[in-house]
Amino acid sequence: MLERLREGSATASFNRWAGFHVVRAVEGECELRMAWRPEDMGQYSGFLHSGMIAALLDTACGFAAATMAGWSVLASQFSMNCLAPAVGDEFVAIGRVVKLGRRQIFTSGELHAVRNGEPKLVATATTLLVSTA
Amino acid sequence: MLERLREGSATASFNRWAGFHVVRAVEGECELRMAWRPEDMGQYSGFLHSGMIAALLDTACGFAAATMAGWSVLASQFSMNCLAPAVGDEFVAIGRVVKLGRRQIFTSGELHAVRNGEPKLVATATTLLVSTA
Amino acid sequence: MLERLREGSATASFNRWAGFHVVRAVEGECELRMAWRPEDMGQYSGFLHSGMIAALLDTACGFAAATMAGWSVLASQFSMNCLAPAVGDEFVAIGRVVKLGRRQIFTSGELHAVRNGEPKLVATATTLLVSTA
Amino acid sequence: MLERLREGSATASFNRWAGFHVVRAVEGECELRMAWRPEDMGQYSGFLHSGMIAALLDTACGFAAATMAGWSVLASQFSMNCLAPAVGDEFVAIGRVVKLGRRQIFTSGELHAVRNGEPKLVATATTLLVSTA
């Protein structure tokens, strides 16, 4: 499972650029990690850019879906709440399948910012994926 | 207005990396453009990565808010609908302020993929920003 | 079109209770009106209850979808922004189809509160409907 | 806590009409129950109307927020995923505070349909509330 997700992730040029690393995968759940790079990932205050927050959450959710439904799924809807400024040395995104339907997959995700080894929940998201098969 | 947004955008390392270009700005509205780069912006099917879609929409909405409320605002909530695969040579994001409140700013955004000069609506979003002042 | 929507609406017991009235319908667009009733539609401050706001927006969006795709659709995702307290004698909800896909329909809606004849935008929403056929 | 929420709920005419019953409340969490009434709560297929689903989720989330922040809060953003048709004799909504900030409160909610004593998760939601004080 872990290997298949890592291979899938490696085919996405953005994931390679960002350095997304799949560290854990079981059926219906996936965990990604990414190291902070101030030189190309920041917004105007120097926090992690909202696009990177969304990318981490959406990818973790999509990979959680892929553990149950394969790769022929695309996110149609993405909804994200930013609870606190995303400041850390490393970011950990966890995605989970909430409901696997015949046509649709509902997932939820959490993003933690890790600072001096301490994780802090900074954003949550839900995605709705639809089968493209 | 345009100059202030371009200067603001230049302070964000992610925006510089992505090549976001502010092409139009009036009170309550902003338009961004970005050239497609397959080598570091793609998802696993070679379309524009959802994180880049979110980044363009959230930034255009945030800049629209900044035209009315300055830079001391942060997005708390972001909701995005992906209508079609984001495939194009260039992407154009337009953000608009829907309601400027005392504590909150509601915005909406559209993302168009341009292919051979033809724009196509590929995603929409709404953001809710809160004053940090 | 108008007659078919009115007949469809009449089959929903909640719509009858609430007094939803379909006043306009063209392909991809629908307008609903509802009179305010303080005795059973209020939240704790006496504004229109969020559930009624959601019901009006979701129904207008669903009817807009029904003008193009018939009744075999169900809303999977609903996202709503409440811009201002919903205070009025009458409420007008307008739903529009943004994108009709093969499997999915994306819509958006606006809710206006009418007070002494003056409409005011109080909420917006998007819905994602999926074919159940 | 339970008494204060029941008194607050009783001031909302919609909650009285719907028969919302607060069955549990601790700091940051609240549980509501409502009996199904086919004669005035149904959509066109006879399932619970989306407006009622939204009302239950939004109210449970709002009450969870009220356990920590009092009544001077209003929901600005509401996002809901409908996982399955809402069919049951009774509905149970649980709201939880995810993050209590100075200006904003983030909550999440779950709606279960109970049929012959068996609960089933049919919808989830998040709300973002803002202090009106």
Image: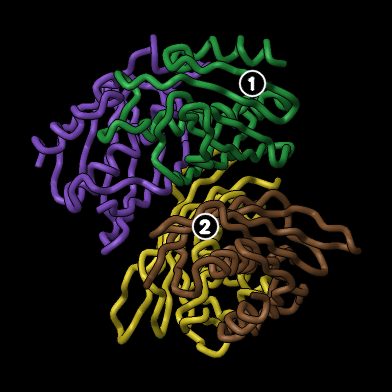
Chain colours: A green, B purple, C yellow, D brown
Q: Which residue is mark 1?
A: A71
Q: Looking at the picture, which amino acid does disc 1 mark? A: Trp
Q: B87 or B57: nearer the eye?
A: B57
The image quadrant where one finds the C terminus of chain A is: top right
User: Where is residue B9, by image quadrant?
Assistant: top left
- Residue B5, position as x, y percentages in the image: 15, 37
Q: Chain of mark 1?
A: A
How many other residues sit within 10 Å of disc 1, few (<14), some (14-19) or many (≥20)? some
Going 40% across and 58% down the picture, which residue do you hit? D102
Going 48% across and 78% down the picture, which residue do you hit? C48
Q: B108 or C10: nearer the eye?
A: B108
Q: Is residue D124 left or right of residue B3?
A: right
Q: Chain of mark 2?
A: D
Q: Furthest-bottom residue in view?
A: C39
- Residue C55, position as x, y percentages in the image: 55, 67
Q: Secondary structure at mark 1?
A: loop
Q: Using the rendered image of the protein, determine whether residue C29 is visible from the camera's viewpoint.
A: no
Q: Furthest-right residue in view?
A: D116
User: Where is residue B18, by image quadrant?
Assistant: top left
Q: Is residue D126 left or right of residue D26?
A: left
Query: Marks 2 and 1, Cα distance to the nearest angstrom?
Result: 31 Å
The image quadrant where one finds the N terminus of chain A is: top right
Identify the mark at residue D127; answer none if there is no mark.
Answer: 2
Q: Measured along the vertical axis of the image, is residue D74 above or below residue B90? A: below
Identify the mark at residue A29; answer none if there is no mark.
Answer: none
Q: Using the rendered image of the protein, determine whether residue C56 is visible from the camera's viewpoint.
A: yes
